[in-house]
Image (cartoon, rainbow, N blue to C red):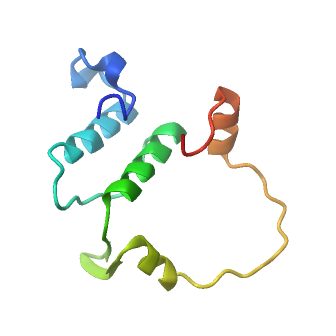
Amino acid sequence: MLTRFGLTDAADRRASTYSGGMRRRLDIALSLVGKPQIIFLDDPTTGLDPEARIEVWKIVKELADRIAILHEGRIIANGTLAELKKLFPSAKVEYVEKQPKLEEIFLSIVGKKEGK
């Protein structure tokens, strides 16, 4: 998990010396130790850099066979990712000039592709 979340260089340091983003990555990595049957994630990518954000969602997609969406303390939808996608309104085709997102600019500069 340390490798997967980019924390190997800091593995011998006390967590109290980690930056906020590093602590967030460590928190998520620790929640995955032991392959738990259920994980509650509340805005899991808040405070993460673009690369770590992509990695977190990649791991969630790999591990989660069912997802529940909570709102105001109640489950309002649950199912597989494919089932939840069906609840999303169908796409409307429009021509829109695509501007790169900040994450895409960052990954382009550092020479990495999204999802890798």
The quadrant of the picture occupied by the N terminus is top left
Q: Can you say whether 31 is above or below 23 in the image? A: below
Where is residue 112? Give x, y as percent: 62, 33
**Image point 27% across, 40% down: which residue?**
29
The quadrant of the picture occupied by the C terminus is top right
**Image point 30% across, 29% down: which residue?**
2
Q: In this view of the protein, can residue 45 be seen by the observer?
A: no
Where is residue 24? Give x, y as percent: 33, 39
Where is residue 54? Give x, y as percent: 49, 46
**Image point 45% across, 75% down: which residue?**
82
Q: Can you say whether 25 is above or below 39 in the image? A: above
From the viewer's perspective, tell me whether residue 80 is left or right of residue 116: left
**Image point 55% across, 45% down: which residue?**
115
On the image, which quarter does residue 47 sit in?
top left
Where is residue 98? Give x, y as percent: 79, 58
From the viewer's perspective, tell me whether residue 109 is left or right of residue 16: right
Nearest the viewer among 58 and 16 is 58
Q: Can you say whether 77 is above or below 32 in the image? A: below
From the viewer's perspective, tell me whether residue 5 is left or right of residue 16: right
Total numbered labels placed on residues in the image: 0
Q: In this view of the protein, can residue 15 be seen by the observer?
A: yes
